[in-house]
Image: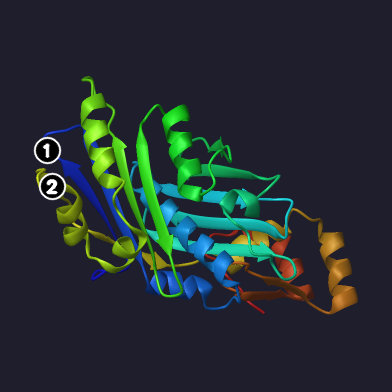
Amino acid sequence: MSSPDQIQRVLFEDADIRSVLTGLKDSYQQALAKHQYPDQLRDILGQMMAAVSLLSATLKFDGRLMLQAQSENQVRVLVAECNHQRDLRAIARFEGELPDYSCFREMMAGGQLVITIEPENGKRYQGVVPLEGDHLNQCLEAYFSRSEQLPTQIHLAADAERAAGFLLQVMPAKGDSGDDWQHFSYLGATLKDDELLQLDNETILHRLFHDEKCRLYEADALQFKCDCSRKRTEDALKYMTQDELEEIVREEGVIEVSCQFCNELYQFDQTDITMMFSDSANIEGSDQVH
């Protein structure tokens, strides 16, 4: 993967088929840096990061796309997010020493997988992805084929150093793309995990589709970035009353809130709580920190 931390869209000129390739390295490592994940969980989280970057490239919106899995097993929560600026973040929550799960579906047994789209302007959308395949890519393929009526092929791979993804999908079109899809999906299915992780985009496309005319769009940079802030943390605390927050301060001395994604720590004392509920707290540009 000669150009990590990039996402690149591809159109095939003689077929109503599109493709997306994504590679993560520094962004992936930064998401892992402040957490100690077992290898199996690390790789799944890398696949989810690759998946959300792929899916975000198929949508035209300003906002964020989130992929979240919850289970009744020891792996409680897996979350990966990507926004329209190609900022990525991800987190996993688990309990105890994990068994050697045979596949993603076993790891998330009894749970669910949800795609959430949050436009900056517009209605929030959620789609439940049934755990119908053994692996994450198979679950997402089934979701697109059934819910969106778009035949889709997805490859996801991750190891200790990097994560990568490849998406192949029929474009909404007037004509019948059935024959084209059968041809392209057959070629795409020959892609191997080590090729996806190690080869650059041009080499992958040439190996898979050397007889096809394709147009590569300029790649977009991907980066790890958490959009947590003191202001957003204050907004979350305001779901509690001032009396409730002040009681915590009296008992603990200070309220500490740590971001799950980046481990940034925000502290609030009595003065902060008073300011949060005062009229001046609503004045634009006010950003006092104590």
The local secondary structure at tag 2 comes to strand
Amino acid at the residue labelled 1: Glu
Q: Using the image, determine if residue 223 lies above or below residue 147.
A: below
- Residue that label 2 marks: 215
Q: Taking 132 as reference, is 111 left or right?
A: right
**Sequence-wise, which precedes: disc 1 or disc 2?**
1
In this picture the colour scheme is rainbow
Confirm whether residue 235 shows in the render.
yes
Name the residue located 43 percent from the left edge and 65 percent from the top edge: 158
Q: Taking 246 as reference, is 126 left or right?
A: left
Q: Using the image, determine if residue 220 lies above or below residue 148.
A: below
Residue 204 falls in image quadrant: bottom left
Name the residue located 57 percent from the left edge and 56 percent from the top edge: 79
Q: Which quadrant of the figure contains the C terminus?
A: bottom right
- Residue that label 1 marks: 13
Q: How many marks?
A: 2
Name the residue located 79 percent from the left edge and 77 percent from the top edge: 254
Residue 236 falls in image quadrant: bottom right
Q: Give the CA distance from mark 1 to mark 2.
A: 7 Å
State the image coordinates of residue 53 (x, y, percent, origin top left): 39, 54
Confirm whether residue 280 shows in the render.
no
Q: Are marks 1 and 2 in contact (CB under 8 Å)?
A: yes
Amino acid at the residue labelled 2: Arg
The local secondary structure at tag 1 comes to loop
Disc 2 packing (10 Å; few <14; some 14–19; many ≥20): few
State the image coordinates of residue 98 (x, y, percent, origin top left): 69, 67
- 106 or 15: nearer the viewer: 106
Q: Which quadrant of the figure contains the N terminus?
A: bottom left
State the image coordinates of residue 143 (x, y, percent, origin top left): 48, 35
Q: Using the image, determine if residue 195 lies above or below residue 258.
A: above
Disc 1 packing (10 Å; few <14; some 14–19; many ≥20): few
Residue 77 falls in image quadrant: bottom right
